């Protein structure tokens, strides 16, 4: 764990108890003699280092040692339009999306998406926060929803749709990139008609949606 999120980061003295105490000292087994790094959700670019002054079975007292601006960003601003798949698949894939430095994930209800799947923003945000605490990323991707591929392409007309194509996806040199990845089953013919740019992946096999997504992100940002 590189740091933890606390809404009171930056205060000279902190008391940790309740769920925060249980997570830190019972789940993560953090030791008293180790410094603790904290980021405040409202100003995540700041990294605060605390010493643990006292700890008992219910609470811990912390003292601020230093405050440093620490907000290294990826070189490329990457937006991903991901057509909605099963919630469990999304949850398992989000940490990888976060670690690869994606700026924003736009979930899209395309024609092949199951319309009864709801995007649980609260749960997904917790998954992303946990990933950032593990990987050291100072923030998390923005999450939002659109109701169609057409809406996404209206907002991001230069997006590269990942689909079957002789032209293969390559590393993108632009500072801002947007990718569009279909659900299980890909895109409908009507959706394909609206694509301005299409690129395929080098694998000769049919990939799962999440596999295509992670592969495309890795190639485009390399």
Image (cartoon, rainbow, N blue to C red):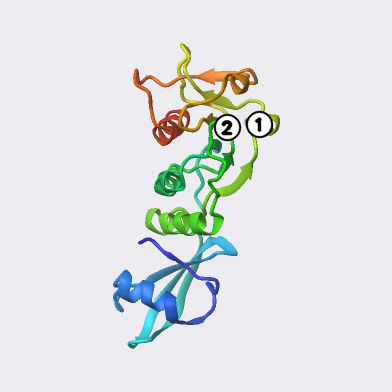
Badge 1 marks a residue whose secondary structure is: loop
Quadrant for the C terminus in the image: top left
Quadrant for the N terminus in the image: bottom left
Q: Which residue is rendered at x = 63% and y = 17% of the image?
A: 193
Pick out the residue farthest to the front.
116
Pick out the residue farthest to the right.
154
In-front residue for pair 67/158: 158
Measured along the vertical axis of the image, is residue 94 above or below residue 184? below
Which of the marked residues, 2 or 1, is nearer the chain's N terminus? Answer: 1
Q: Position of residue 65 (x, y in %)?
A: 44, 75
Name the residue that disc number 2 marks. 178
Q: Which residue is rendered at x = 48% and y = 43% of the image?
A: 101
In-front residue for pair 205/134: 205
Residue 214 is marked as none
Instruction: Please say if the residues under marks 2 and 1 sit with CB atoms less than 8 Å apart.
Output: yes
Choose top left, top right, bottom left or bottom right for residue 53.
bottom left
Measured along the vertical axis of the image, is residue 80 above or below residue 63? above
Measured along the vertical axis of the image, is residue 220 above or below residue 119? above
Name the residue that disc number 1 marks. 156
Q: Position of residue 70 (x, y in %)?
A: 50, 57
């Amino acid at each position: 764990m590189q740091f933890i999120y606390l809404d009171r980061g930056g205060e000279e003295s902190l008391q940790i108890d309740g769920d925060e105490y249980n997570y830190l000292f019972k789940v993560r087994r953090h030791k008293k003699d180790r410094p603790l790094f904290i980021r405040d959700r409202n100003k995540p670019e700041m990294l605060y280092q605390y010493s643990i002054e006292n700890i008992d079975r219910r609470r811990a007292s912390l003292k601020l040692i230093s405050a440093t601006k620490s907000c290294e960003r990826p070189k490329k601003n990457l937006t991903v339009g991901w057509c909605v798949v099963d919630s469990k698949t999304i949850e398992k894939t989000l940490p990888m999306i976060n670690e690869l430095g994606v700026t924003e994930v736009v979930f899209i209800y395309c024609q092949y998406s199951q319309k009864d799947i709801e995007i649980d923003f609260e749960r997904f945000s917790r998954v992303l926060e946990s990933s950032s605490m593990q990987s050291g990323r100072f923030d998390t991707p923005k999450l939002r929803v659109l109701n169609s591929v057409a809406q996404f392409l209206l907002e991001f007309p230069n997006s590269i749709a990942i689909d079957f194509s002789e032209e293969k996806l390559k590393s993108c040199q632009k500072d801002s990139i947007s990718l569009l990845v279909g659900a299980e089953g890909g895109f409908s013919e009507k959706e394909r008609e609206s694509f301005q740019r299409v690129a395929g992946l080098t694998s000769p096999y049919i990939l799962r949606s999440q596999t295509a997504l992670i592969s495309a992100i890795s190639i485009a940002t390399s």
